[in-house]
Amino acid sequence: MESFRTKIRWSFRYSIRILVELLKDLWKYYFTPYPLLLILGSIRRIIRRLKIIWLAKPRGRPPIHENVVDLIIEMKRSNQIWGAQRISDELQLMGINVSKKTVLKILRINGFVPPRTRFTPPSWRSVLDSLHRYWAMDFTTVFDSNGIQLFIFAIIEVPSRKLILINSTEHPTRN
């Protein structure tokens, strides 16, 4: 924490600079069509800057108590398949508010790294490389000259318009 003398010295220099800006604004008062807005704006700036100097910002959230950290680690050890979200939900049921990110951070600090995902999405390079194998399917019906309904299934390769497969049948559900 800064000493009071340092705070006074710093705020004195700062207030001199603010007063210089206020004098500039007052000088502009005679040359602007909106003098009242200009003075109100400078007063707002002075108040905001003095609040920054004199009203210290709080440190943030209080740290998690050691008993809660021990409880999180114990829950993870006894239930290996539980993740951070499940542990956070269970703590919520007990009346302890701890977010998923905080639980994950505590688990990582204590050596519980999350397992690798089972499915990794394909990279953009593999997606772009597979575009030359882009196929389209269609399943439609037509009537032949005898009035019998035929079911047609077709697959084509889109870039080259090459016919990959075409089948027709009168009974699509028959084995």
Image (spheres, helix red, strand yellow):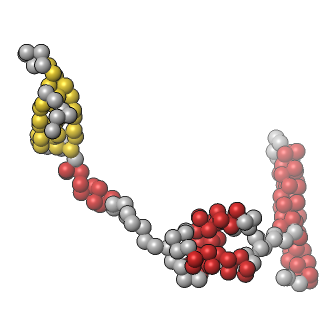
Picture coordinates of residue 116, whole percent (x, y): 43, 71
Q: Is residue 65 above or below residue 23?
A: below
Q: Residue furthest top?
A: 146
Q: Position of residue 78 (x, y in %)?
A: 58, 77
4 or 56: which is nearer to us? 56
* In the image, residue 11 above or below residue 142: below
Describe residue 53's horizontal placement relative to residue 116 as left or right. right
Q: Is residue 102 left or right of residue 34?
A: left
* Residue 20 seen anywhere in this rendered image of the structure: no
Q: Position of residue 11 (x, y in %)?
A: 88, 74
Q: Quadrant of residue 124?
A: bottom left
Question: Relative to residue 134, is residue 75 depicted above or below?
Answer: below
Q: Residue at x 22, y 40 (%)?
A: 136
Q: Is residue 23 left or right of residue 88?
A: right
Q: What residue appears at the point 39 percent right and 66 percent down from the top-left corner?
A: 118
Which image quadrant: the N terminus? bottom right
Q: Residue at x 72, y 66 (%)?
A: 94
Q: Residue at x 19, y 42 (%)?
A: 158
Q: Is residue 63 visible?
A: yes
Residue 39 appears at what percent x and percent y?
87, 50
Quadrant housing the C terminus: top left
Q: Nearer the viewer, residue 155 or 162?
A: 155
